[in-house]
Amino acid sequence: MTQHVFDNPMTAHVWAQFSQDSGRSNNGNFYFEGRSLYSYGAHYVAGYLPPAADDVDGVGPALINGDSYSVSTGRHVSYARQAVLNYRTFPNLTALARLFEAGLSMAAENLNPHCFPPEPGNVSPRKLAEYMAPRLKAHFSSPENLPSDLHMVAGIFAAAQCDNPERRARVAWRTAEKAAERQAAKRAKAKERQELENLIRAANTRPDDMATEIEAHARRVAPHYENAKAEWESRGRKIHRAMKAGRKAGHTARVRAAQPVYKAIRENLYRFEAAAKRANRLFVWRNESEELKTGVAAAHAFKEGRTVAGPTRYGRTRPLNSHDMRTGATAAREMVDYLTGENDFAAPAAHIMGHAPGELAERLTALAGELDSVAVTAAKAERRKARRVALAHIKEAAGIVGQGIGAPAVVAESCERAIQVVSRYASRPAIGTYQPEPFYPVPGAWRVSGWTPDKFARLESVFKAARDEAREELDRTGREMALDAWRACEELPRELSGYLPRAMPGGAAYVRARDVVRDDSGAITGGELETSQGARVPLAHAVHVFRFLKACRDKGEGWQRNGRALRVGPFEVDSIKPDGSFRAGCHAFEWCEVERLARELGLDDIAPADTTENRAHA
């Protein structure tokens, strides 16, 4: 049974093979019918497979839509582009694809003319050319439908089986150029007419009404002050351009009447800046208040010996610490300045609320001092905790290096954590006669225990050597380890995920078998073959291909797709080399990789056979 539901990349791959009539993605938003590949509906053709120039039933270079639509549609277009080896990018591909679909439908022979629905037969190249030639000329005579190259237009005429495609393309190209010139002249006249209308509108406006409108807009536009100001600046520039066009056309009276309106706009733009300043002061006060509340919450939690979480910028949470207390104290002092300092914009609001600014400032100053005091004590406790964690990192790395245990990725990660600790206190190499100090002094408790900068320097060199050795080993074996884990269908560890290759050095794909099902005799009846490039096919189909590959190797002959087909899932094998290597669609496979998988599945002794089929039954 033919599969019709795939993931997005696989949907594009199956479409590019032109091996089945239809297919869709899991959610149905990306699908193909015949030669057309759609994104979210028939209104947008992401890709199209036109007929070949010499074979109306074949497939020529794929056409990819060059019009942007949305982010997700852009991804669909990218999948289509990656699925084909040869493509051309066309604007307004949807209209072009509809032309081809209508032409192919009209030119197809009706095998049952007296019944409904009609049964289409072979496509007549002559009828297709007669239908498509005038319509393609009209399509490409529009400048917005032209691609970047004249030869691409000629290729479309050739795909439509038209004679003299180069001449027809040149005629359509010249027609489009003349149409573009006419459109440019028409746009220039429309622009001049629009600017004169803007001049009349400005001349009939009272400057006082304009100033009142700007003032009202500035009061209600919060918080989009910059956008509103830009909008009025644009209106001012529009009036200024209209005045220039009016002078050029001789409308001096209207220009004099519009001048005060333009001046009123320029003189009242400051209202948006003033409104933004007022809103910014309110935002600053609220922000300082929130930081003060957070600092107070952190201080209370520390005194009670508990941990409290606070929000971060990106919606996550983190434990509050001494930094939040110091930030709260700074916020309290800033609020004092807003109440009684030079920038005392909060004092009028305090009076309105029934509070004396001086009393509020005194209470905030006392609160800031208390927060600073608690922050000092909390910072000491945090440093002690951090040093215990750092010492644990050093001991862990020393144990791993001393005993020589652990996987390369574990050794490298543990040594890297330890290096970040010891490098802070290690002695630094001399620069001539100058001896730099360590980045940080050794903590007192560690000095009493015998830790010195020289000891940290020795540990740093040992850990760096072990880390570099582990990374070198990981670089040597990481690719093989990641590939072995992938072939075994195991979940890749985080440290190996970056080493998994997508293909062999020559571009050929790796393969693996998943969910293998066998009958009582041991023959494979189910399962899936997956490539390292994400394609998946039934494993039973792959076994048939393997038998034919063995037959080609035994004969020492290659094979090319012609009247017979070799199906593997939604794909077809295009060519086979005498050594058993082959290509199917955009995938290439080496015999050594195919033989390895066959050996794992116990198929190395399977009998070779010709498993190809007539194309009519493929």
Image (spheres, helix red, strand yellow):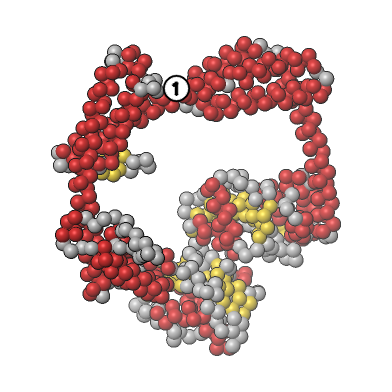
Q: Is residue 137 above or below residue 456?
A: above
The residue that label 1 is drawn on is: 278
Residue 263's quadrant in the figure? top right
358 on left or right of 548: left
| Relative depth, front residue between 131 and 415 | 415
Within-10-Å neighbours for mark 1: few <14, some 14–19, many 20+: few
Q: Residue at x 19, y 59 (%)?
A: 447
Q: Position of residue 287 (x, y in %)?
A: 35, 30
Q: Position of residue 248 (x, y in %)?
A: 81, 24
Q: Locate the C terminus by quadrant.
A: bottom right
169 on left or right of 86: right
| Relative depth, front residue between 88 and 349 | 349
Q: Is residue 354 above or below residue 591?
A: above
| Relative depth, front residue between 43 and 347 | 347
SS under mark 1: helix
Q: Is residue 40 above or below residue 332?
A: below
